[in-house]
Every structure is written in structure tokens, then in C-alpha cells.
Amino acid sequence: ISEGRAIYVGYFPASKAITVVVVNPYQNKDLSPTFLERQFHDACQALSIEPPLRNDINFKVDYVAHVKDAETMMQRAINGHSHGRENHVPMVAVIECPNVQLVKLGIRALDDFPCLSVPYNARDSQYQILGWQQVAAKIGMQRCAASVQWLNKRINLSRYAHVPLGNFELDWLIFTADVFFSRALHDNQQVLWISDDGLPDLGGINGEQNCFIDEVHQPVLTYPGAYRNITVELKIHHLAVNALLKYNLVNEMEGGTLLGFGHELDSGTFSMNDQNGFDESTSCVQAFRVLKQLIQRCLADAVTSGNVYADAILEHLYRWLCSPKSKLHDPALHQLLHKVMQKVFALLLAEFRKLGATIVFANFSKIIIDTGKYDLSRAKAYCDSLLRTIQSRDLFEWIELVPLQFWCSLLFMDQYNYGGIPVKSDEAMNAESQICIISSWNIAKYLPKNIQDPFHFFVSQFIYIPWNYAQKQAAIKASLQNGDSCTPSINVGAAEAFESEIMEYIKGQISSYFTHALLGMVHDIGLHMKGMSRSENSRNISSGLPQLMGNAHRGDAALEFIKYVCAVLALDQSVQHEVWVLRKNLLKYVGVREFAPEAEFHDPCHSFVLPNVIFSYCNDHRDLDLCHDSDLLTEEWLSAVPECGQPYDREVMENALLQIVRQRERLYHLQDLVCVRCHQVKAAHLAEHCVCGGSFRCKEDASEFHEKMHVFLNIASRQKFQLLQECTSWIRTEDRLNLAVKLFKG
């Protein structure tokens, strides 16, 4: 339903009939039974379903002016097909719409059947102004064709989970995992902590809400630099499953101190904290043991019988533990698994380094490594050997590492600022092939628009020129050795000499080409700015600065260009001296001292990641950086899965942000006081001074908290989250912050 327009589609497979009712307040009629039959036939072929014979299904199209009239017609159609059959068979209603309850209120005939809700795609209701009827009808035929497959899958899931068909919720993964876990806990004589608000019901202990801090920090390792060798990006799968199944081994490696307990986890015994009555690390010991047994059974089902539902539960294990929508959500259990995952992740990176790989970037989702090889074939062979060795280790038995992308050259600042030459195919690149240079620099968005293209040009040149020189030199050396390969490999003995030769070449290019070209560009920018009025100049400078988390310096455009370009060129450690000399000359040209505060480069954008944003239609989940994500900055709120394309649920995202803001505010007001001299936490409630004689201060300064809230305020302003904006604006008022400081000091 959209702006008084709607389309109702009823598919009755037993009666071989499809009824379409179009709600259109205007007179145009664009649909016909022939059009519907053709679209249904095409949809069946796209899903690899044998399409029905011509005229085998009866298509009917009706037009009405109001939604109520359409509901009445659908009511008659359902009654006609359900009561008119001589042989009564069990029937279910499969409903796919934005609001199931509203449809059931309008079509009372649905109350006579068990109703199954299909996750709907919000994009389906975004009608065009013209030609919307055929677009909507095409989507309706696609959903009808897919409904049979969906129902068969849901029946198989019902049999596997031993859950009545109509009891599944829209997010079947979380619901099924809750059912399995509750059964396992019950079998182990554990009391369930089922709750609808995301906090476990532990019989009164949950009153201490400050104990349930569910915001964990994902480890992110970044090693900026220029990587002129072949690098590879690896996708990590099943890290949470591996950590859960291998926690005993990890705990032994840590001497039984990693989780705060040793043999107690397997024996099922644990003790309460005598002082506080509750301890998070021991509260979920038995639940952690039961969860491991459950995942072992799911793993056995997935490996031995190839059960797709068990495999899906394993794939979404960490999402389930993180989700407050889970009725068995326990922040302590989440934190415990996260702690083990961090240790396994650290050991995995250590193993990579032990095998000779250089880490470029790493988080729980992916790892980028420098292979140290110039030749693509050797790099791939090294990567295959590396992955086989790692996956042969018992500690990493269930971790799956999949190469996603190889890079011939990579200039890396962080995951949002990088550029490089990707390998487009399995074949080695030759001199005649067209070179594709990826230039993904978030910091460029904070430059004036008219100098963003020159920034990308010079950075791309800094990537391409050394790579092209290396290719030519390698080809010359190969021809001298009577080689016939266009991209020959470099033997180990000559590798250091070859690398030194490339380094000297880059230094020469910095001192000659880049110095001359950048001085010319800075001169052109200065002339352009002088020809503009003061107001036009200010508008031009601010035109490239997104009003988000940026603290970009709104100064001279030429100065900003110098700072950004030199910061990127300086990523190459081997030519840093030459880059600093270049920077000094460029700054001197614009009249700025080398060590002046305004000459320092600072990342203009803070970062905030909202974890595990779920798409209900395809069950895909992503961690969204609301400050850096280019799609969000351009308001492209769509799923990255091509066959889904569902918009983000903005209301759910805003509620998640509000929960984080309120949690951080609560922690700020409940924080400890620390001594300014010995940095010990204040223990006595009434003492004005520490035993060492020092005064007390808040552990988190008001200005630091103010800056964090400013990030959320800018997110709310950029993304038009009104409630979040009101909440953060109220929190950031100076009176409240000053009052909080006085209360802590008193």
C-alpha cells in the first residue's frame, strides 16, 4: 500500500488460480491476465521451477477505488476457493505484507487458517508515479512463484526444530536458536532467564543494570603503509563457533586464567562473589557449557547430514548472542564469548606472523596480509600454503579463511582510506591490459569539491608510477635472461636489490615529478581562490565538508590540499624523508611554517560502528560505520545483497543508537572517582581526599563525554533521527554536565 494505491494478490495453488485486485483511485488500467501469466511464467523460470502450461492457471484482475473494497473482494475469493472444494484438505495462509495484523483485520477469512508470515521487503511498497501497476504486479508474481519454495523450506525447518509451523517468528534464526538453547538448558536442569527487554531475568539480580554492559569493542588492527608487493584480503568465517568449541584449549594455554575459572566450567560448579553477591564471569558458566554442547550438536548435523538450518545457526551464532531481540539474550554470556574470540583472534594473527605474513589490517571479519611476493602466481601459491597450514592447527580447526581480493599494489591508511591496483582475474596482468586503480579515500570528501579530483589523481599516480616501473624492470630482466613471461617472478637472491631499486626510483619521482606537479597545482588553487570573493571562497571550502563527525580545518583550500596529499604520500615509510622535504616546500609556498599547528594533519572524521544491523528479508547482517560509510552519507539505505535490496529499518537503528546513548550516559553518571596522584579508585564513600593526599576526579572527563555525545548528535542531524537528536541535545546541555561534576565531587 502506498499513497492510496495498492495491489492485493491471492495465489491458490490447489485451485490453480491467481486473483489480483488493484486499488487505484484513478481510471488507468495497465494490467491484463496475459501480462500476469507472462510474468508468472518468467518468475518460475528464474527460480528454476517448472512453469505451468499455458492457460493452466486462471488469472483474474479487478480494479477498485478503495482499500476496503479490495479487502472485500479478497474475502470473497478466499471463501470461494476454501469452501467450494469437494475434497477438503488442510490449508494454510502464507502472508507477505508490511502489516500482517492489519491485513487480517480487513480480511476476516484469514482467521479460519493457520497463518504464516513471510518477511516482506519494504522496497516492494515503493511505487513509481507512472507505470507502477506493472512493476507491482511483476513483484507480486515473483512472490507467488517463490511462495511454494518458501513454504516447503519452512515445513522442513519445522520438522528439524520440532516447532509447530505457525509458531515461527519473522527472524526464524533467532527464534530457532532460542528454542534449541532453552531445551538444552531445561535438559541440564537450568532455570531459563527469558525476557523480552534484552536483559536476563535473573530473579532480582538484573536490578543492577550497570552490570549488564552489552557494548563490547571489536578489535581493529591497522598498520598504515605502502605495500608494493602482492597483498590479499581474507574473509573470516565461523570465528565465534571456533572460539566456543576451543575455549578449553585456549584456557589451558592461558594457565586457566583466561575466563576466570578453570576446571569449574566442565564440572558445572561455580561460586558467587561474596562481596557483591553476583559476578558476571561466573554467572553464565553453566550456560556457556550448555551452549557449547548445543553448538557441537548443530555442527554434527551440518557436517554429517549437510543440514542447511544447522549451518545457518552456526553462521549466525554471534549475531544471535548479540541480539537483544533474543529472549535468552545475556550480556554476560556475550562478553564471555567475545573474550575468548579476542584471544583466538590474537593467536590467529600471531600464527600468520610466525609463517612470514605481514598484517596490514585485521578485524573479526577480515584480514589483509602482505605476501612479500612480487609475482602473482607465487603469491597465490604462498597464500594457499599459508591457509592450509593455519587450518591444520587444532586451535583453528573450524575457522574458514577465504581469499576475496588480491592487490598488486596497496596504499593503506585505514579501512575507509585506501587505494590500490586490484587483480581483476586469475591471469597475470600484462603491459597491454587496462589498469584499474581503486581510489577510496574518505578524507577526500572533506576537501573542497574542486580539488577532490586532483587529490585522487596524485594519489593514484603515487600508486601507479612505481608499480609500472617495477613491471617494466622485471620484464627487462626477464628478457635478458631469455624469459618469455610478461610478468616474471623475482628470485629470492635479487629481491632485496630489486626492492632497493624501486625505492630509489620513488625517491627520484618525489623529488622531481611530484614536487613540480604539486607546486603547480598549489599555485593554480591559489590563483583560483584569489579570483573568488571571500563569501564564495568560504562556500567553496565548506562545500566538500560533510556536516557529520568532521573537525576539518576550514582554512585555506591550498593548505588543506597540501596537508591531505602529503599525509597520504607519507604512508610509504621508505620515502618519508623526501615527502617531508616536499611538504616543507609546499607549506613555504603558501606561507605556513612547517611545525605550525595549522599545518598538522588530523583525520577529519570520527568513527562510530553500529554492529549487527539486520535485514529481516534476507537475514543478512552488517556492521555499519555511520560516519564513514559512503552509502549512508549519500542516503543509499539499501542492503548490499543484490537479490534483496531492502532498505535499512531506520526506526530500529535509531532505537539501537538511543539505547547506546542512554547506556553511556548512565555509565558516565555511575563512574568511579580516581585519585589524580596515585590513580587509585576511590573506595571510601565519605573521604574527600585519597590516603596519599591527592584529590579525586571523574574517571571520564566531562569534555570527553561531551565529545562522544557530539558524535551521536551529528549522526542524528545527518541521518534525520529526530528523537536521537532531542535526546543527545538534552544530555549535552552544560547545566547537566556541570551538575553531574558537582554531584561526583560532593
Image: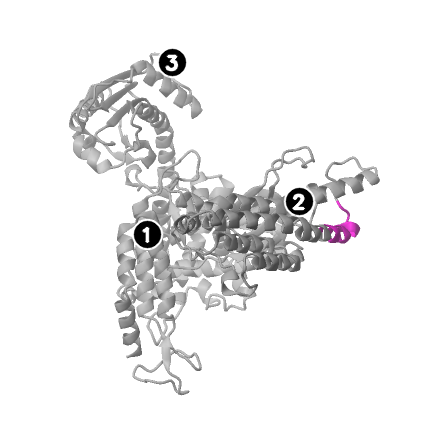
Please name the residue shown 32% across and 18% down the image.
36
Of the two numbered discs 2 and 1 on the same chain, state the one appearing first in sequence. 2
User: Which corner quadrant of the image does residue 351 belong to?
Assistant: bottom right
**Please, what is the three-letter code of the amino acid marked with disc 2?**
Ile
Q: Nearer the viewer, residue 68 or 400?
A: 68
> In the rendered image of this protein, does residue 311 appear above or below residue 258?
above
Q: Residues within 10 Å of mark 3 (few under 14, many from 20)?
A: few
User: Where is residue 290 drawn, in percent x and y?
Assistant: 41, 56
Residue 716 image label:
1
Q: Residues within 10 Å of mark 1 (few under 14, many from 20)?
A: many
Residue extent of the magenta highlight: 490-502
> In the rendered image of this protein, does residue 243 appear above or below residue 124?
below
**Please, what is the three-letter code of the amino acid marked with disc 3?**
Leu
Identify residue for label 3.
Answer: 53
**Whether residue 575 can be seen here:** yes
Of the two numbered discs 1 and 3 on the same chain, state the one appearing first in sequence. 3
Please name the residue shown 40% across and 40% down the image.
639
Q: Say whether residue 441 is left or right of residue 538.
A: right
Mark 2 to mark 3 CA distance (whole Å)? 61 Å
Asked if residue 498 is among those painted magenta in the image, a careful observer would answer yes
User: Which corner quadrant of the image does residue 45 belong to?
Assistant: top left
